[in-house]
Image (cartoon, rainbow, N blue to C red):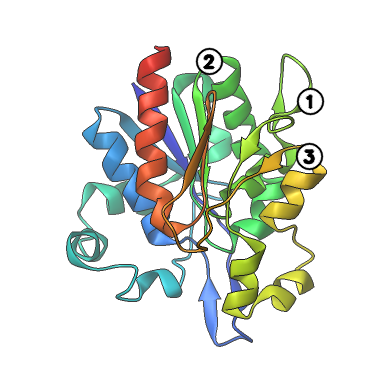
Amino acid sequence: MRAIIAVTSASAPLFDGRETTGLFISEALHPYKVLTAAGFDVDLASTTGKYTPDWLSQQPDFLNGEDLAIWNDQNSSFRQKLDHMRPAAELEGTAYDIFYASAGHAALIDYPTATALQRIAEQVWATGGVVASVCHGPAIFANVRDRNTNQPLIQGKTITGFTSEAEETMGIAQELKGWKSELVEDLAARLGAKYSRSAGIWDDFHVVDGRLVTGQNPASAKSTAEAAVRVYNNSA
């Protein structure tokens, strides 16, 4: 069993230039832990093979305890996989059973045109695998199609992801609009997907629609991966 976690290669100033967004660490680490514990051989990949850690994701509210120890240990299996990622173009999607798009706000920048990662997601779907995303990860679906129908993969399906309300609450909605990037709720509407969310913007919440599994926010990264494993096991 093999799984691949997509990682954003993008980085950008955020909060009026005070901080830098990139990969939200726990959104890759939590699924990595779940998938490896379930017996999957896990690869990580980004467009360039590089990443920038998101500033907010390194704060104690989001990174602490065992997760912080793993992150700080450059010899941990997670850091070794992350720090030595191959560019997605070098990988073949037919090798994987689960595709999981981690995120961070920076994913809004590069995921919509991340053709190599999108190809992998399409191949995983076409071969009966599970496709999953968390938080801003649905940005990858901007150009992911179901090869049987040639329609957007999420068309007619229910998904979740980071809420527009949360962007407003964080005070960065206007900055994101300046990026000319599509927010998750807007992407879902444009591609004909139904968007679902929890009442609370920070609740642990995920949606399963067949072989498509999506999570709302960083708190949902673990449960989304656990659901992806269950879906895989039930369909294998």
Q: Which of 206 and 136 is in front in this view?
A: 206
Q: Within 10 angstroms of label 3, few (less than 14), some, or many (20 or more) residues?
A: some
Task: Give the residue type that dot 1 points to.
Answer: Gln
The residue indicated by pointer 3 is 191
The residue indicated by pointer 2 is 128
Disc with the residue nearer the chain's start (1 vs 3): 1
Whole-number angstrom distance, CA of label 1 to CA of label 3: 9 Å
Disc with the residue nearer the chain's start (2 vs 3): 2
Task: Give the residue type that dot 3 points to.
Answer: Leu
Q: Is label 2 in contact with label 3 (beta carbons under 8 Å)?
A: no
The residue indicated by pointer 1 is 151
- Secondary structure at badge 3 equals loop
Asked if residue 41 lies left or right of residue 187, the reply is: left
- Secondary structure at badge 1 equals strand
Q: Looking at the image, can residue 73 be seen?
A: yes
Residue in view at x 64 percent, y 86 percent = 16
Whole-number angstrom distance, CA of label 2 to CA of label 3: 22 Å
